[in-house]
Image (spheres, helix red, strand yellow):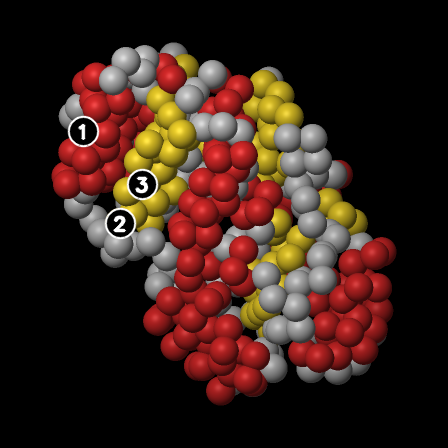
């Protein structure tokens, strides 16, 4: 949609060039992401919007830097990728902003013991590290850490260990409502939660997720997982675009085509296309260095679908609010709903 709009604009002003869109599915697989990037480079591509996962970005970073390919990720958030002077830019805040939300949510609930479960990749490790650090600063006890392989699809051992940790805490006199599990996962959370639901004690504690599971359709469609998530109030944070007029217009356009709203990172992708196009107009060069040199001025005057984009010295977006979403049962049907907002500037959680 953004490419179409840009090209219509270019035609209107009489520009002698157009954007050409290539779409590649990286499967959120780091190896596939690098293969796709090398293929795109051979076709002459020097600007890429994406990929989504930090593990992918980490794997292609060396190649992108060596070949001067501008990477603008709409959703990669691992703090370890915040490096000044490289060719990796991210139109989303890194997890130094998201990481504290879970522990602060726990503190607000009166939770005293936090158990972390996470996928062992660049994103999961980074987010878990920030969560652990914040928990310590807030005086919470990190009572357990369960790290699993990113390729895992079966979680009987991990769920059993989690139940064992919770039972141990309860046996020591810690009330279940004082315990929270934070799971940092992608779609594999469906299998994990399905297995966790087999343990009665895991229905009695609080649960918290991340942007990796927010609005994950498979969680709402699996009846047992949806029931479990709703019962324990499995809250998940995700970057919240500023509700600009352009946001509303884009939301309605996409809903009319897809039948449902886009995920929030789609607005970052839309803005990335426009920002690159405006930088190309300003420099008249299809060159990563030229585009990068124009970015500060373009962004200073650009107010897009996701709001005003301010980048730090490493090329990451500065600050943002986060929607808090959970699976809610309404009229017998389970669906994701936004129920609150976390304000990064103040650390405050406001429920709708």
Kindly identify which residue carries mark 1. 164
Q: Position of residue 316 (x, y in %)?
A: 64, 57
Q: Position of residue 252 (x, y in %)?
A: 62, 38
Helix, strand or loop under label 3: strand
Mark 2 and mark 1 lie on one chain; the one further toward the N terminus is 2
Helix, strand or loop under label 2: strand
Q: Residue at x 20, y 22 (%)?
A: 167
Q: Residues within 10 Å of mark 3 (few under 14, many from 20)?
A: some
Q: Position of residue 291 (x, y in %)?
A: 73, 74
Q: Residue at x 52, y 60 (%)?
A: 80
Kindly identify which residue carries mark 3. 145
Query: Is residue 92 shown above or below 275?
Result: above
Q: Pointers 2 and 3 in contact (CB under 8 A)?
A: no
Image quarter of the N terminus: bottom right
Q: Residues within 10 Å of mark 1 (few under 14, many from 20)?
A: some
- Estimate the spatial distance between the alpha carbons at disc 2 and disc 1, rounded to whole Å: 17 Å
């Amino acid at each position: 949609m953004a490419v179409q709009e840009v090209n219509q604009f270019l035609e209107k002003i009489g520009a002698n060039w157009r954007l050409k869109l290539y779409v590649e599915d990286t499967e959120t697989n780091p190896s596939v992401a690098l293969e796709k990037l090398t293929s795109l480079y051979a076709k002459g591509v020097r600007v890429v919007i994406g990929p989504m996962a930090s593990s992918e970005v980490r794997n292609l970073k060396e190649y992108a830097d060596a070949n001067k390919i501008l990477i603008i990720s709409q959703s990669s958030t691992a703090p370890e990728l915040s490096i000044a002077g490289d060719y990796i830019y991210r139109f989303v805040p890194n997890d130094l902003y998201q990481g504290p939300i879970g522990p602060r949510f726990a503190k607000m609930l009166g939770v005293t013991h936090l158990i972390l479960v996470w996928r062992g990749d660049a994103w999961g490790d980074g987010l878990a590290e920030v969560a652990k650090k914040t928990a310590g600063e807030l005086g919470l006890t990190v009572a357990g850490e369960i790290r699993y392989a990113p390729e895992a699809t079966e979680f009987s051992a991990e769920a059993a260990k989690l139940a064992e940790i919770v039972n141990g805490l309860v046996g020591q006199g810690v009330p279940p409502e004082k315990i929270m599990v934070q799971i940092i996962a992608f779609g594999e959370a469906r299998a994990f939660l399905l297995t966790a639901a087999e343990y009665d004690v895991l229905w009695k504690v609080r649960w918290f997720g991340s942007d990796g599971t927010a609005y994950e359709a498979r969680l709402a469609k699996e009846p047992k997982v949806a029931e479990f998530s709703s019962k324990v109030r499995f809250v998940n944070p995700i970057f919240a675009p500023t509700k600009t007029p352009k946001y509303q217009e884009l939301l309605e356009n996409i809903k009319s085509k897809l039948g449902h709203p886009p995920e929030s990172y789609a607005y970052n992708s839309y803005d990335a296309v426009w920002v690159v196009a405006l930088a190309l107009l300003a420099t008249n060069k299809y060159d990563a260095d030229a585009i990068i040199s124009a970015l500060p001025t373009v962004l200073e005057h650009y107010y897009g679908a996701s709001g005003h984009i301010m980048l730090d010295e490493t090329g990451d977006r500065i600050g943002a609010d986060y929607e808090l979403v959970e699976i809610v049962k309404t009229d017998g049907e389970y669906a994701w709903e936004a129920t609150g907002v976390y304000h990064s500037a103040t650390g405050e959680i406001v429920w709708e």
